[in-house]
Image: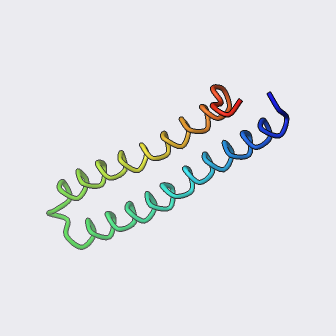
Amino acid sequence: MDPLVQAASVLAAALAIGLAAIGPGIGQGNASGSAVEGIARQPEAEGKIRGTLLLTLAFMESLTIYGLVIALVLLFANPFA
């Protein structure tokens, strides 16, 4: 493999996993904070808020896993090699 392609793949993988972790991390923090505020304001709606929160957290976590898959493909099954 060309050293330039290898170096670019490593940098692209690092960028992919970095952005895939930062974005959902910020989103999960905002969603959790809003859910806690909502539960504090309306304790009777706790079950509904918690269910929605867990579903949205699962969707955000899947975005992080997609970034990991892209990084692993770039590192181990590089289509540009």
Farthest residue in the left direction? 44
Q: Is residue 7 above or below residue 79?
A: below
- In the rendered view of the protein, which quadrant contains the C terminus? top right
- In the rendered view of the protein, which quadrant contains the N terminus? top right
Q: Position of residue 32 (x, y in %)?
A: 38, 60
Q: Position of residue 3 (x, y in %)?
A: 85, 35
* Residue 28 quadrant: bottom left
- The residue located at (19%, 70%) in the rendering is 42
Work out whether residue 23 or residue 37 is closer to the camera in this orientation and state it. Answer: 23
- The residue located at (65%, 30%) in the rendering is 78
- The residue located at (55%, 50%) in the rendering is 20
- The residue located at (24%, 73%) in the rendering is 41
Whether residue 20 sits left or right of residue 78 in the image: it is: left
Whether residue 19 sits left or right of residue 50 in the image: it is: right
Whether residue 9 sits left or right of residue 34 in the image: it is: right
Work out whether residue 67 or residue 77 is closer to the camera in this orientation and state it. Answer: 77
Work out whether residue 71 or residue 62 is closer to the camera in this orientation and state it. Answer: 71
